[in-house]
Amino acid sequence: MRKVAEDKGMLVWMTGILLFLYTDAESQDPAFSQFYANPLYMNPAMAGVEGPAKVYLGYRNQWPGATNPYVTYHASYDQYIEVLQGGVGLHVGNDRQGGGVFNTLSVDGIYAYHLQVNSQLMVSGGFQASVGQRNMDPSDLVLPSELAGAGTTTLTAYSKVYPDFALGFGAFYKNFFGGFAVHHLLEPYSSPSEDPNTRLPRKYTAHLGAMFPIIEKRLGREVLQLSPHLVFMQQDIYQQLNYGLEVLYKGIIIGAWFRQDLLFSYGTAIFSAGYGNGQFRIRYSYDAKLSPPDLHIPTLGAHEISLVAIFENLNKSTKHRAIKCPKI
């Protein structure tokens, strides 16, 4: 009986979250814990900063213990092109909320101009043009009124296609890097009703990081590196601060982060592990939510996996200087 009660309580809680997304559709963009595994999603100015062609594949399962978890798939490609004096990129993302009640697809084209100021400083400015599609299918949604036996409530399915744009700036100096980006510049409507509450609010991102070699190079490669990061994001009234440290030792990647939600005053501990070399990187991370007892938020966590492949031989002719930027 206790298990049944817990499952019913979870269903009510999840349904409440979905209703919030429907009635106040200023929903947040999907958040990733492995920020620098997919830098194009964070800041379009990061396109091509590593130089060679790079392919990223990412998967995130948020609240896997829930009946209908939130699942996000992302893929991207970017590289530096000398004739364009910058990097180009293509990013595709799909976010399924509540088992597919809400489904958002975005396709992003990116260009970032790179300016080599001197031998140690490079700055970049990025522009992103996107096409997004948001679908809502309430056929499998059980509302609280139905659970209480008070009849049914009808929600209408819809599909909305909209244009979207983003701008970003980045700077790379010696072992340090950082940037600033603004997404949803025009705050497009995400539903056919074009109700003001369905506009996607602008998202602001500021990030700062560094890579410090602790044990010097052997055979041209650092043996031990420390990489601290700080990322701040704001979308509408929602704010979060992420900070942590990653360690790379002979290809082994270990990381620990803390995400502070500044609106609801709870945090998330993030732990990651992986392996990487010059052509290949794979990582896994787990989010453990640390919510205050009075909020009664189920601790469901999140799993995230990323895979990155670098194709050095596709970019041999470029004179683009390698930039010390996050590569793990």
Image (spheres, rainbow, N blue to C red):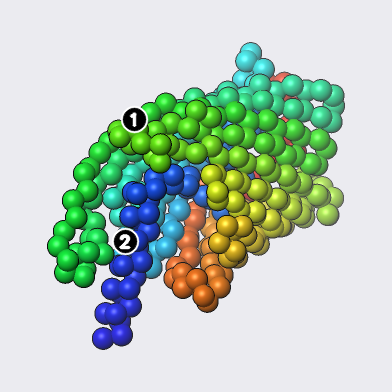
* Coordinates of residue 42 in the picture (x, y in percent): 58, 40
192 sits left or right of 248 in the view: left
Q: Secondary structure at mark 2?
A: helix
Residue 90 location in percent, x, y? 49, 29
The structure residue drawn at horizontal position 56% and vertical position 73%, both measured from the top left corner, is: 292
Q: Amino acid at mark 1?
A: Val
Residue lying at 60% horizontally and 64% vertically, measured from the top left: 265
Task: Judge by depth and name the residue closer to the eye, 250 or 59.
Answer: 59
Which residue was labeled with disc 1?
Answer: 161
The N terminus, quarter of image: bottom left
Residue 116 lies, with reference to residue 296, above or below; the image says: above
**Foreground label between 1 and 2:** 2
Amino acid type indicated by mark 2? Thr
127 vs 10: above or below: above
Residue 293 is left or right of residue 158, and the answer is: right
Residue 115 position (above or below residue 64)? above
Q: At 75% from the left edge and 39% from the top edge, which residue is drawn?
A: 177
Mark sitting on residue 15? 2
Q: Nearer the viewer, residue 133 or 26?
A: 26
